[in-house]
Amino acid sequence: MVHGGATYALADTAGGAAVVSLSRDISPTVDMRIDYLAPVTDDIYATADVIRYGSNLSMVQVQIHDEDDTRVATAQGTYKSGGQGSGTPWDSSEHRETGNTPVRDRDNDTGRDDDTDEDTTER
């Protein structure tokens, strides 16, 4: 038996790949819903159809089938398809060039971009 999270991950990946094939850029998931129709006990595969490709958002329908072609899940996702240019959180050029991924410690977030714990506030 396959966990529903694995089925969801496959649907999300297939939907995102369908949008990337059109946008040729990062297309983060904005929203996704999935309906599980049958238990998964075999290998599964996904097919994704972009039903709307907009300048900012795209919608994708994804069908998940098992090896016997039984539909085991259906999903619909919304993906960011535009506006990923320079200066946005989705600007991937910096990460591609440097290989760095910015990480912030949310438990000790000071709002500074450095990684020190020292208080450098002038008094």
Image (cartoon, rainbow, N blue to C red):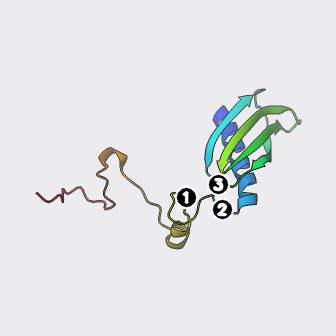
Which quadrant does the N terminus fall into? top right
Residue at image coords 80%, 39% = 63
Is the residue under label 2 in contact with that under label 1 (CB below 8 Å)?
yes
Q: Position of residue 83 (x, y in %)?
A: 60, 58
**Dot 2: what SS?**
loop
Residue lying at the far right in this picture: please name it.
68
Q: Residues within 10 Å of mark 1 (few under 14, many from 20)?
A: some
Q: Quadrant of residue 23?
A: bottom right
Residue named by callout 2 = 25
* Residue 67 x/y as whole percent: 86, 39
Q: Quadrant of the C terminus?
A: bottom left
Furthest residue in direction front, as rendered: 55
* Residue 101 visible in rendering: yes
Q: On the rendered structure, is 48 left or right of 34? A: right
* Residue 55 horizontal side relative to residue 49, left or right: left
Distance between mark 1 and mark 2 Cα atoms: 9 Å
Mark 1 vs 3, N-terminal side = 3
Q: Earlier in the sequence, mark 1 or mark 2?
A: 2
* Circle 3/circle 2 CB separation < 8 Å: yes
Please state the horizontal and vertical placement of residue 8, each as a whole percent of the image. Answer: 67, 38
Could you tell me which residue is drawn at 32 percent across and 49 percent down?
Answer: 109
On screen, residue 3 above or below 14: above
Disc 1 residue type? Trp
For this orientation, the residue located farthest to the bottom is: 97
Name the residue beneath numbered marker 1.
90
Q: Secondary structure at mark 1?
A: loop
Q: Nearer the viewer, residue 2 or 87?
A: 87
Task: Give residue 121's quadrant in the image.
Answer: bottom left
Disc 3 secondary structure class = loop
Location of mark 3 (residue): 27
Crowd around label 3: few <14 · some 14–19 · many ≥20 (10 Å):
many
